[in-house]
Amino acid sequence: IKYRFFEKASKCSKEFQRIKNQHADKVIAQVTLGQVLTGMKGIPLLVTDTSKLDPNEGIRFKGYSIPELREKLPKIAPDGEPLPEGLFYLMLIGEIPTQEDVANLSKDFATRAHVPQHVFDVIDAMPKNSRPMTQFSAAILAMATESIFQKAYRAGVNKKYYWDSTYEDVMNLIARLPHVAAYIYRRNFHNEQHIEPNPRLDWAGNLSHMMGFDSEDVKRLFRLYMVIHADHEGGNVSAHTAHLVGSALSNPYYAYAAAMTGLAGPLHGFANQDVIHWIFQMTEDLDTETPTDEQVAAYIKQTMEEGRVIPGYGHAVLRKTDPRFTAQQEFAEKYIKDDPMINLVNQLYRVVPPILSNVGKIKNPWPNVDAFSGSLLYHYGIKEYTFYTVLFGVSRALGVLASLINDRVYGMPIERPTSHPLHWYRDMVDGD
Ligand code: CMX
């Protein structure tokens, strides 16, 4: 896989260098002050090949939509969900893998999955009430002792080979994340009764196993979950952070630990736990498990009047229902009959969008991926919702770290936009 990847990527690298050298003066966009002051939305500033987000259609990975991935990527059982290893292969190499390619990748991850003891020691040294994402980010940082890139850099490797040791770090890191995540889960919620990995299982199936869920139902959900959370083009906080930190030639462990501290924010990956927390608060405050639409509508309005957001709704780029939400809804319809939490999530899908639309300023009233994911986990008995963002974090490694290898093959430079004090912008509009 490594050399198949390099063969493809080096052609793109030549394109990158050619465009950079021959067309650097070409103007490709105008920047408005509004864009600068609202989070740089819509400015084409990054090169990311793994996936592309369309505001109306949603994410495509190397051109494939989520329904297409569910149909075309290799699965363990014909009616099951695609293996995330296959998506990783697609993002790296640009082709749908064969069953054999995916089996090889699963084996490769299994052989790389050993987590050094000091990483578990670092986790164990933290108070049990530290947030799971705090433990997860710290554990990834602690694993930087293993960085092959860092050793190669110190040994003076030529910059054209940076990609090689980055690839090794990325593969090792992805291989080890499920064990780290499961360790945190069992430590916090199952009395430190840890479960060893099973090297015969696929990457997502093994995560489910190590967390203590050996049913095919949960493994199937985890495969879907890991596929749909894997990447969302390059500008989202976790992907952009990994790219930015990586642009300083920080090793992949540093870059991914930084990305995870971004994912831990409530406007990003923390929203998947916030959704469940908010639903619980609502049913408690309304004193009913089955509120009417009118009660729910009043609660939504009250939340916004308190200056809070409705978690799981809205998006910086999307302008329609997130296809990752739809994929999970379809999964629930197929496999789950009448679950109270899922019923509430579906009720919110009916009640929230018209209210958000009426506010006026909210650009996207529709649900994002986080609106559904917690209810599925909850249904299958993973009720400890403070852990949910860690699962998002395991998955996000696939896309973000595939991009980091690309960055190194392309020889991307350090990222360094310009900043100005507020008065510089004021003078632009008001004059001196
Ligand atoms: N509830 C209430 N208000 C919302 C809202 C929501 N779900 N979504 C947006 N708004 C508000 C914004 O806070 C902003 O208000 P101010 O002008 O007072 O600051 C206004 O509407 C305009 O925001 P926007 O341009 O529509 O959205 P942004 O690009 O600024 O923010 C996002 C996008 C996702 C942060 C925002 O929609 C949000 O906070 N949603 C809830 C949290 C959430 O679900 N995050 C997960 C996103 C997916 C992921 O990364 O995992």
Image: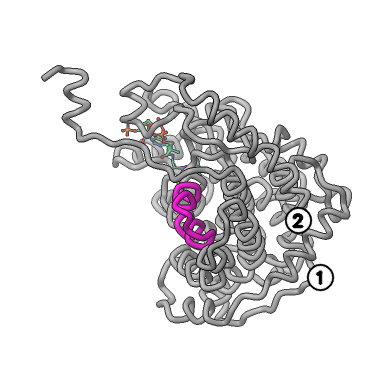
Whether the magenta-drawn stretch holds residue 257 is answered as yes
Report the disc number at residue 185: none
Q: Amino acid at mark 2?
A: Arg
Label 1 element class: loop
Nearest the viewer among 292 and 370 is 370
The answer to which quarter of the image holds residue 162 is bottom right
Q: Amino acid at mark 1?
A: Arg
Q: Is residue 15 above or below residue 129?
A: above
Q: Which residues are magenta?
A: 241-258
Residue labelled with disc 2: 220
Q: Is mark 1 within 8 Å of ligand 1?
A: no
| Coloration mode | one colour
- At 53% across and 63% down in the image, what residue appears? 156
Relative to 357, 173 lies left or right:
right
Disc 1: which residue: 200
With 194 as the anchor, is 139 left or right in this view?
left
Which quadrant of the figure shows ligand 1? top left
Classify mark 2: residues with Cα within 10 Å, few (<14), some (14-19) or many (20+).
many
Sequence-wise first label, 1 or 2: 1
Q: Secondary structure at mark 2?
A: helix
Residue at position x 87%, y 48% from top?
Answer: 98
Q: Residues within 10 Å of mark 1 (few under 14, many from 20)?
A: few
